[in-house]
Image (cartoon, rainbow, N blue to C red):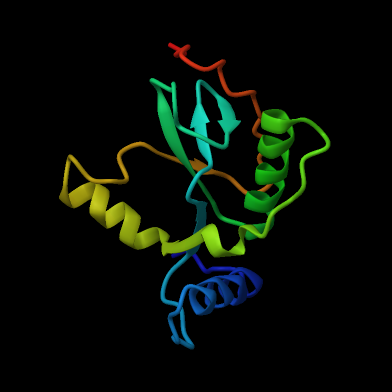
């Protein structure tokens, strides 16, 4: 049996509250996703456009998601880019619910998920030029 870190449960509850849910409990292992962050050909990107092998990175630590966002943002727009408030775009899910959905349905929305283990250093890559697809 896996036991979630108390700090990540606290982060999960904060994310849920910012998304309009008033729950005071979180059931399961929290995992975090940023709606416009994708993994394309082993590189983090802030868009899924032009990506043939897109995966959805899901993080066990909110801090890892935030660090990955900063790296992807810098790779996409250069070092001068400003960090926007990403809190409104972070979603939290229970790991158990994702796994159950994957088991129950072969066409689950979670079939393209990539679980980033805590502390994993995923490289960020630039977006392809307009009109060019990777593959």
Locate residue 129: give its quadrant. top right
Locate residue 135: give its quadrant. top left
| Residue that extends furthest to the front in the rendered view of this protein | 130
- Residue 90 in view here: yes
**In the visual, does 67 lie left or right of 14?**
right
Can you say whether 105 is above or below 1 in the image? above
Give 96 or 82, whichever is nearer the viewer. 82
- Residue 121 in view here: no
Residue at x 57%, y 37% (from the top left corner):
46
Give 96 or 72, whichever is nearer the viewer. 72
Give 4 or 132, whichever is nearer the viewer. 132
Residue 63: image location, x then y, percent: 69, 57
Can you say whether 60 is above or below 131 in the image? below
Can you say whether 71 is above or below 51 in the image? below
Residue 94: image location, x then y, percent: 41, 64
Give 122 or 15, whichever is nearer the viewer. 15
**In the visual, does 103 lie left or right of 48?**
left
Locate residue 60: give its quadrant. bottom right
Q: Quadrant of the N terminus?
A: bottom left
């Amino acid at each position: 049996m896996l036991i979630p870190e108390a700090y990540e449960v606290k982060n999960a509850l904060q994310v849920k509250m910012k998304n309009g849910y008033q729950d005071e409990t979180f059931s399961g292992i929290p995992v975090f996703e940023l709606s416009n962050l994708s993994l394309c050909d082993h590189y983090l990107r802030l868009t899924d456009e032009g990506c043939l092998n897109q995966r959805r990175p899901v993080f066990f630590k909110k801090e890892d998601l935030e660090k990955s966002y900063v790296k992807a943002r810098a790779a996409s727009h250069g070092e001068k880019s400003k960090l926007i408030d990403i809190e409104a775009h972070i979603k939290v899910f229970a790991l158990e619910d994702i796994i159950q959905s994957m088991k129950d349905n072969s066409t689950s929305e979670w079939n393209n998920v990539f679980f980033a283990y805590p502390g994993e250093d995923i490289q960020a890559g630039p977006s392809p030029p307009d009109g060019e697809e990777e593959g």
